[in-house]
Amino acid sequence: MRFVPSTEETLLEELKIINSNVYYNRIVKGKPTLTIEDVAEECAEARQFGAERYLIETDDRFIGILELLMHNPKDGCTWLGLLMMKRDHQRQGLGYAALERFYDLLKARQVSNFRLGVVVQNEPAHLYWQRQGCIQVKTTMNNDGQEIVIYEKTL
């Protein structure tokens, strides 16, 4: 498994991954599918904030997306902005493997903890992150005006 930097050439692959997750899109984005323009805008916004965005590749296939913000200017913390696996690759342990690779990346950069935000209505995501040992820090509003729970994990 490896992390391949996101580029304009990988936007279509990202769109396929994102649109395989209709439930997430409805809750977080307010619509079941996104357009290539939506994904391009999301990637541009991530770059503007200094985030690193990667496609997760295994067996020569892109199976997920991971976004990392080393220093969030709002709180000074490292953030996992997105971890999304393609729908047909979920429940196979690949998300856990990607997280382990992510943890190794953070440890190599001498980062001992990170934060992530989950939209309040996304119950499956809350359960997932709690199983990963993430602790709820607070609730707040995200940039889209949605209430989110901020979790933190110590490595």
Image (cartoon, grey):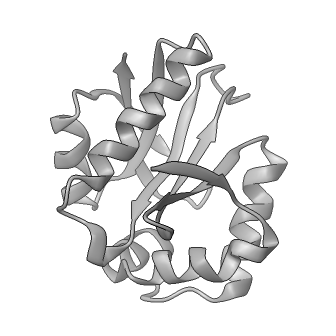
Residue 103, horizontal then vertical, whole percent = 43, 27
Q: Quadrant of the C terminus?
A: top left
State the residue at coordinates (60%, 40%).
Answer: 68
State the residue at coordinates (55%, 33%).
Answer: 79
Between 114 and 149, the residue placed more toward the observer is 114
Residue 67, horizontal then vertical, whole percent = 58, 48
Between 96 and 122, the residue placed more toward the observer is 96
> Where is 120 relative to 23, above or below?
above
State the residue at coordinates (47%, 76%).
Answer: 17
Between 57 and 132, the residue placed more toward the observer is 57
Residue 101, horizontal then vertical, whole percent = 43, 36
Q: Quadrant of residue 143?
A: bottom right
Going by the image, does 59 lie left or right of 80?
left
> Where is 66 relative to 27, above or below?
above
Residue 100, horizontal then vertical, whole percent = 36, 34
**Extreme residue in the front direction:** 59
